Image: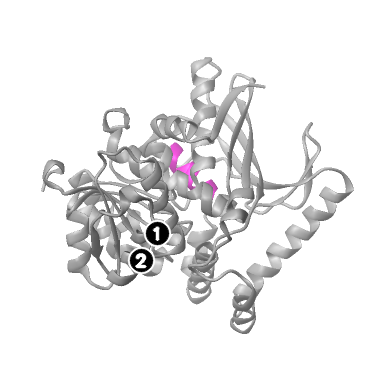
Amino acid sequence: MNDAERPYDVVVYGATGYVGALVAAYLAEHAPAEVRIALAGRSAAKLEKVRADLPERARSWPLLQADSTDPASLTAMATATRVLVTTVGPYARYGLPVVEACARAGTDYVDLTGEVLFVRDVIDRFDAVARSTGARIVHSCGYDSIPSDLGVLLLHEQAAADGAGELTAVGLVATVRGGFSGGTIDSMRAQVEAVGADPALRRVVADRHALSPDRAAEPTPSQPVDAPPPARRGSRGMWTAPFVMASYNTRIVRRSNALQDWSYGRSMRYQEVMGTGRGPVGALAAAGTTAGLGLVLACMSFGPTRSLLDRVLPAPGTGPTPEERERGWFRMDLDAATTSGRHYRGVVSGPGDPGYAATAVMLGESALCLALDGARLPDRTGSLTPASAMGTALIDRLRAAGHTYTAGAA
């Protein structure tokens, strides 16, 4: 079936979940009127309830029943749309059949995964299939990992435009107001469990080029550690601690570089940390964050303590109130050095709780970018990243949606 014969431009799968409903609401408010949208999930009754709570223009959106355990329903859903958005995770548990349906149908796909093992599995199983059908399988189109991925792309493009050479080192400092979603925590838990059961998977997760399209071709310079100790960074005097998303985001950025023939720089070293503030308070926060993150990961690795954590961490499908979502924000400060000796700085920021409100914007605009901006997209298919699949077309959309993307000489 070609695109002209498909009844929908975008289908939101998982629309009855917390984040799925936010994405549906974003599209109802911001998608152009001519975009044909449908909602999908396991329960028709729950889909009807979600649709009833959306703005008026969405009340006539069709509803599709689909279940990750029912391949026929996934095939029907994938062949009915040009772009499939899925918020159904953990993706390693529920996502592979959805990717397969899209890859075989030539349907563009976007998700919110932050799971190294899932993406590695998709690459190995379905990258070639998707390339043969022309499908773009685009992972990590939320706070994990759009700000990181597009921020580094923007630095590269600015340096290239200035004739400053390739990037040699890029550091990102993340500051946020908001929490991690229950879905993100559930995905972390699932990956920790998988790694604990199979030492071979532990080696994959630890590999800093785990998502490379050609591991043997990766350059030899070692990459920075994922969880550096607390430190005071540069002229800003900001204390930093390990960033919980760094061990995933860095792999996505490195994959983007490799998919674009290492155009950012074959010797580029990339690291992410979290900013905790300045002065003694920042130092204490950095130490506390480092210890707390280590404790949480250790507890997740041990069955009895993992069950205790489940009682206090956000559950899948839950999230903050609208007022709490509105009060949140995120900011990423990037510093880069180039082969010419010049230095660049970039900022990626936006309003709204990063794991919910800001993520709904990122995922919604990613779907619209794939559906509407075909002429501006890179000529690339298969298992992709936001930067390699959508590039500056998505940056322009996110700027128009109220997010900040800047890069310039330092």
Residue at image coords 24%, 53%? 103
Q: Position of residue 399 (x, y in %)?
A: 49, 31
Magenta region, main secondary structure:
helix
Q: Which residue is mark 1?
A: 53
Q: Quadrant of residue 68?
A: bottom left
| Secondary structure type for disc 1 | loop
Q: Is residue 280 at least partly visible in the picture? A: yes
Q: Position of residue 66 (x, y in %)?
A: 25, 67
Tell me whether circle 1 and circle 2 mark residues in contact (CB < 8 Å).
Answer: yes
Residue 268 numbered mark, or none: none
Q: Is residue 222 above or below residue 117?
A: above
Q: Position of residue 272 (x, y in %)?
A: 63, 45
Q: Quadrant of residue 34?
A: top left
What sort of colour scheme is used for the picture? one colour
Q: Quick one: label 1, few (<14), some, or many (20+) residues within 10 Å?
A: few
Residue furthest front in the image: 56
> Disc count in the image?
2
Q: What's drawn in magenta, residue-wise? A: 248-257
What type is the residue that disc 1 sits on?
Answer: Asp
Relative horizontal placement of residue 199, taking residue 393 as reference (left or right): right
Relative horizontal placement of residue 386, taking residue 143 as reference (left or right): left
Where's the C terminus, which quadrant? top right
Residue at image coords 48%, 60%? 204
Residue at image coords 23%, 63%? 74
Which of the two residues, 30 or 96, is positioned nearer the viewer here? 30
| Secondary structure type for disc 2 | helix
Residue 204 in the magenta stretch? The answer is: no
Q: Position of residue 314 (x, y in %)?
A: 58, 69
Residue furthest top in the image: 163
Residue at image coords 23%, 59%? 101
Q: Which residue is mark 2?
A: 49
Relative horizontal placement of residue 169, taking residue 200 as reference (left or right): right
